[in-house]
Amino acid sequence: MIRFAAVVAVSTLLGLPSLSGAQGLGQLFIEVTDGAGQFVPGMTSSDFVIREDGRDAGIVSVEPMAPMKIAFMIDNGDRMVEMNALNALRDGMQGFLDAVPPPHEISLFTIGRNIQRRVDFTTDRAELKRSAGEIFLDRGAGAVVLDGIRETWERRFEDDEPFPVFVMVLTDGTESSGNYNENEYVALINELITNSITVHAVLLSSRGGSVINQFALNLTENTGGIYENIAAATGIEQMLVSIAERMNAHYENVSKRYRVVYERPNPPGAQISASVTRPGAFLTGLYAGLRMQ
């Protein structure tokens, strides 16, 4: 049995874990503005100094914030059938796709019974909307929530992804992923945090108390995402559009940041500091990740 209270965010500015799959690398998100508070373009590795416990860290790459790469995951299983939610679900998907503009890329998956990729990452909203309109519900199917997140991250995102996001429409039905013990679940959470992955969830719930309720709340809390619990399918569109608008506003806020990847000293330090050396440029924010909350 997973004890949810034991799972906490472990990736902080102090003791930042190495990037997954990149031994000895860390990342920081650094906001750089000029004297008027405007974003300073064209910063390079020579414009930053990163130290851990006072030891200089070699900078590997410096990039301005990339657009979001969003895995849009839909529970099309049995609880959606029970709640007669197909039309409301399709309307909500269309509303979300309209509300998140290019250049942000979106992929579309269903997770009833098994994970199915409907559309790969694209900026083509017409293709995404066409596929969303063709989704049907699967009677008797549970949702593969945890397996859906893990497999999509491992198989569909690129290595060293700069701005990964999951947006999930879930129900309080059956979770049909493989069994996860507490250590495996904590490892999944840490993988999300380490790679600055944000999970947002809209949960259609009339029963309450299901394991998916707990997963959705815990995933969003640990990754700094949005959690919305609604009792009627007619609320899906409003909630998805609201989440999209908040995501857009958050992106505008973080667009003044640079993603700085650097080599961590051996052994890694406990205190991390950063500075900028370019005249007229000021470090106005230092972040371990891209948390919305």
Image (cartoon, rainbow, N blue to C red):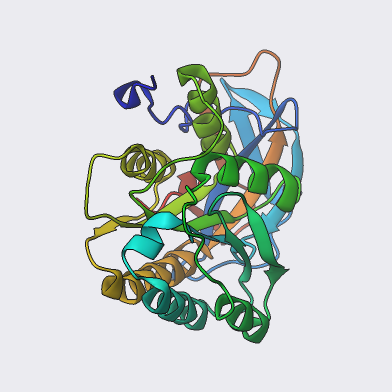
Q: Residue furthest bottom?
A: 126
Q: Position of residue 41 (x, y in %)?
A: 65, 68
Residue 204, quarter of the rendered image: bottom left
Give the position of the N terminus as an image quadrant.
top left
Nearer-the-camera pick, 261 or 101: 101
Q: Is residue 121 above or below residue 19?
A: below
**Residue at image coords 51%, 60%:** 138
Asked if residue 225 lies left or right of residue 127, the reply is left
User: What is the total number of numbered labels drawn onto the structure image?
Assistant: 0
Residue 103, quarter of the rendered image: bottom right
Q: Is residue 140 visible?
A: yes
**Residue at image coords 64%, 63%:** 66
Q: Is residue 104 above or below residue 55?
A: below
Q: Is residue 288 visible?
A: no
Q: Position of residue 72 (x, y in %)?
A: 55, 63
Q: Is residue 247 above or below residue 77?
A: below
Nearer-the-camera pick, 156 or 207: 207
Nearer-the-camera pick, 205 or 11: 205
Asked if residue 94 lies left or right of residue 42, the reply is left
Q: Position of residue 284 (x, y in %)?
A: 45, 53
Q: Residue furthest front?
A: 140
Residue 129, quarter of the rendered image: bottom right
**Residue at image coords 53%, 63%:** 256
**Residue at image coords 70%, 42%:** 154
Nearer-the-camera pick, 226 or 228: 228
Asked if residue 202 lies left or right of residue 57, the reply is left
Q: Position of residue 120 (x, y in %)?
A: 72, 66
